Amino acid sequence: MRRVTVAVLLPFLAVAACADDGEDGDEQTSENVATAYASGSDRLTREELEAGRMQMGWREFVRRDTAADSLGAGPAVPGSDTTASGARADRPAESWDSITAATVNSGATALPVQGDIEGPSVLRVQVLLDRALFSPGVIDGRWGRNTEKAIYLLQEREGIRPSGVVDKATWERLQQLARGTQQIVAEHRLTAEDVAGPFVTLPAEYYDRRDMDCQCYESLAEKLAERFHTTEELLEKLNPGADLNAVRAGTTLNVPAVTSRAAPQGAQVARIVISDGGGYLHALDAGGTLLYHFPATLGSDYSPSPSGDYRVTNIAHDPTWHYQPDLLAGVADSEPDAVLPPGPNNAVGVVWMQLSKPHYGIHGTSAPETIGYATSNGCVRLTNWDAEFLAVHVAPGTPVEFRDID
């Protein structure tokens, strides 16, 4: 994933845009073409990301939705309103500077983990959440709403009083679900596939990308960060002195240990529930048990996601992307259509799950750091790794319910 350096035109606006043609129905395609349409910028500045990190307005929607699903929402926790609680005064001090492979793997987790903090304990929690399939989104060693939301929902499912705070009971259960705490940071020997290109320079204008073979990664560092569900900054922190753009096959790097991610035996996704207000996608089994939680980016005020019930109709891996200006707010209708090449920096990412409402789908993203922070033109965006996981565990016909659409 690229560093966040480009300012956006509108606060919290991101690219993966979908448009409504006013008709419902199936849209089956024999080709890997995503019928999502995009405009604007898919980047947020560091300041914009930081401004949204500790916003906790999702809580009211989580409580409402878990009650609707009969998951047994627990009592409200003192201080659990729309802002995150601060770290306890007696909590051992940690910082970003204290993150190393050694401190993450061998140090004790400083409970409770909560509030506006960063450091080894947060990183441990995020890696285990990822392995337990309650995704924190991008693993970055910093506490924020995606991490707190995942903890709250895991507590809800596991019968622990939901608070969003990692206490002793939550930490012990999280270790069990993630198969232990060994190898939070693992040594990974890079393969030829890990370091293979091509790497490209992506033109800022979409039309200038039409003749490219691939909207590939722009650098090896970007590819490696996405491979391990993290940021270039964190990979550099775990590998001091390493040039992530110059490493070769055979080089050993310290990376978040997330490659063992696997669905529980016998788990079958029976339906998907998507909350706009809560900013998440849930995969549930036939009995309503929450199997997987993924943070999601949904529609904006001027181009909201749909409400109601739909279904997955088609799944396309490594899709091309159809850019159609006449269906977009803020884009001149006179601009021509374009079909842009596939690749991880495609606006719809590496997978497109078409819904039974034309031009709407669930898909990946070229900007994983924005998931849960930005808005779309109606579609449901996940990190590429979460979208890929979901795509192999759902099938055409899977029901999809949208909730909390403003």
Image (cartoon, helix red, strand yellow):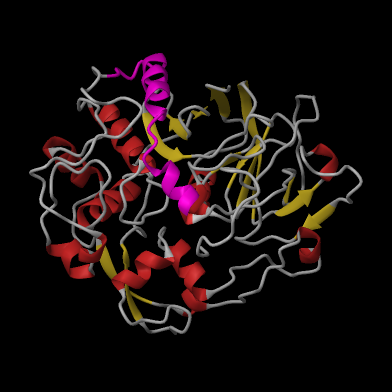
- Which residue does the image show at 46% across and 34% down from the upper left? 280
Q: Position of residue 181 (x, y in %)?
A: 19, 55
Q: Quadrant of the C terminus?
A: top right
Q: Position of residue 178 (x, y in %)?
A: 25, 48
Residue 52 colored in magenta in the image: yes
Q: Is residue 368 left or right of residue 175?
A: right
| Direction left: furthest residue | 90
- Which residue does the image show at 29% across and 32% down from the upper left? 152
Q: Main secondary structure of the magenta part?
A: helix
Image: 262 above or below 359 = below
Q: Is residue 241 left or right of residue 192?
A: left
- Which residue does the image show at 30% across and 78% down from the upper left? 240
**Displayed quadrant of residue 219:** bottom right
Image: 204 above or below 240 = above
The reply to whether residue 134 is visible in this rendering is no
Viewer-nearest residue: 33 or 10: 10
Range covered by the magenta-colored residues? 47-73
Viewer-nearest residue: 150 or 241: 241
Q: Position of residue 203 (x, y in %)?
A: 72, 67
* Count of numbered circles on the image: 0
- Which residue does the image show at 54% across and 42% down from the upper left? 374
Q: Position of residue 151 (x, y in %)?
A: 29, 37
Viewer-nearest residue: 131 or 151: 151
Image: 359 above or below 334 = above
The reply to whether residue 331 is visible in this rendering is yes
Residue 352 colored in magenta in the image: no
**Displayed quadrant of residue 158:** top left
